[in-house]
Image: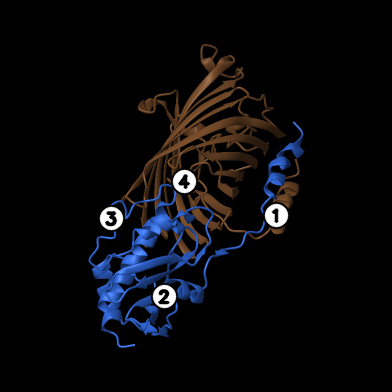
Chain colours: A blue, B brown
Amino acid sequence: MNHRFLLVPVAALVIAAPVQATVYLSVEQAQALMFPGATLAPVPITLTAEQVKSVERASDVNVLSPQVKAWRSPTGGWFIADQVVGKHEFIPFALAIDEHGAVKSVEILEYREAYGDQVRNEAWRAQFVGKTHASPLKLNDDIKNISGATLSSRHMTDGVKRLLAIYELVLAHTNG
Amino acid sequence: MKIRLLTLTLLASMATMPVAHADEPLFGYIYTTDTLPKDKSEVEQWATLREGRSQGTFHLLQTRTEYSYGVTDKFQLSGYLNLAWTKVDGNVPDGSTAPPEVFADYNVPSQGSWSRSRLESFSMEAIYRFASPYTSPVGAAVYLEPSLGPRTQELETRLILQSNFLDDRLVFAFNTTIGQERRYLHGDPSADPTSDDYRDHWDKETDVNFGLAGSYRFAPNWSLGAELQNEREWAGFNPFESDKRTNMAWYAGPTLHYGGRHFFMTFTTLFQLHGARDYANPADESFVVHGITNADDFEKYRFRLKLGYYF
């Protein structure tokens, strides 16, 4: 066999094309979509160590950062921009909470993975509407799993649960 | 074969490869339970350089070109083309020359340098995941890989367990692998004339490997980990016959993984640890030198590079 034969598979590798992250919504666009016509007031919050522990205890989900990027609506609702762990990179998303502490809507801001972007599906995201901190928010329980996108489904579910716990324990008691 | 040429070509390919984003596998030798989603596919290229013995010259380069397809979200099929190149010289403890296992069916002069490249085999691989580590404390999958090559037949079965922690950024995987192979060998005129080894025959062997690995995603796209592998060999197809044991060795080393949106890269280095055993030969003919085995499927160092692209 000719030794150069061994080089053939190497040549087969040089086929990758540049791929950029897909940005679906900026934070400003998400705010306009989730609270149409409202002027949101930024209320940046840094969780104390004690609050981080309380949120993790209440939600059973790790707090990735003590910084909470929150905005308050004139009617008492909240807009929070956050992110969850994806297969390789973070998945930025936004959560809108109404004045009663229930989920108004969830939007995926950016998706950087090859697979699992079914979490952008409107019907899947609609499962979160009306959920509160008291809801189970558990995959395969009150939130359906997406086969082939299990990691993204679980982390998005956990992310919403974490933010609802932050709302209940911190934001609901904040005068912004 | 100029090994330098292949290395340079590999490096040049990597340097010119556009920056993209991508995925699995986290490890070089240990499998995880992840499979492709339904109707998705992937091409993957492996290059494994197996280097060094206790004496002489030993180089073995094996490449694997793979195409994988997600039949369902839990079931993945792959096809491989396996090629190999070797160069050996005085690589046996007694100073003679012997080929690595994948070239064992060649007649090799017992003295001097010998080099050859070959088509090693074609393989099919099926992985079925019956528990996901993202929804269960322990994910589990089974793996089946039949291979067919010139004068070689092999069936490898594997149980894969995986457990994730810290939002799936810390991953542990455990593999148990059983490989049963038949290799057509030429007769050895120096062997006992009443034995199978004296004449051309199908040699049977069973490999049982236990592998443990852990990896942590220390930055977006990048994971660093370590792998530990225990490899055991038996003559024949029954790994429960202790008198048929032939060799045992340990390997360990670091592994670095980059996973982006479509492109991934994994590089693993394994070192053979002291503690190898040669069960088949008397002490004065043992393949173990200073705790390292020089049997035909073992060497001091293994370097494995995997590159892949998801569609």
Dot 2 crowding, Cα within 10 Å, few <14, some 14–19, many 20+: many
Residue at 30%, 75% (x, y): give it.
A166
Q: Secondary structure at mark 1?
A: helix
Residue at 52%, 72% (x, y): give it.
A26
Label 4: chain letter: B
Distance Cα–Cα, label 1 vs label 2: 51 Å
Look at mark 2 in the image and give the residue it sits on: A35
Which one is in front in this view, the residue at disc 2 or the one at disc 3? 2
Residue B248 in the image: x percent, y percent? Answer: 44, 38
Q: Quadrant of the N terminus of chain B?
A: top right
Look at mark 1 in the image and give the residue it sits on: B11
Distance Cα–Cα, label 2 vs label 3: 25 Å
Answer yes or no: are tags 2 and 4 on the same subunit.
no
Dot 4 crowding, Cα within 10 Å, few <14, some 14–19, many 20+: many
Amino acid type, mark 3: Asp
Look at mark 4 in the image and give the residue it sits on: B30
Q: Earlier in the sequence, mark 4 or mark 1?
A: 1
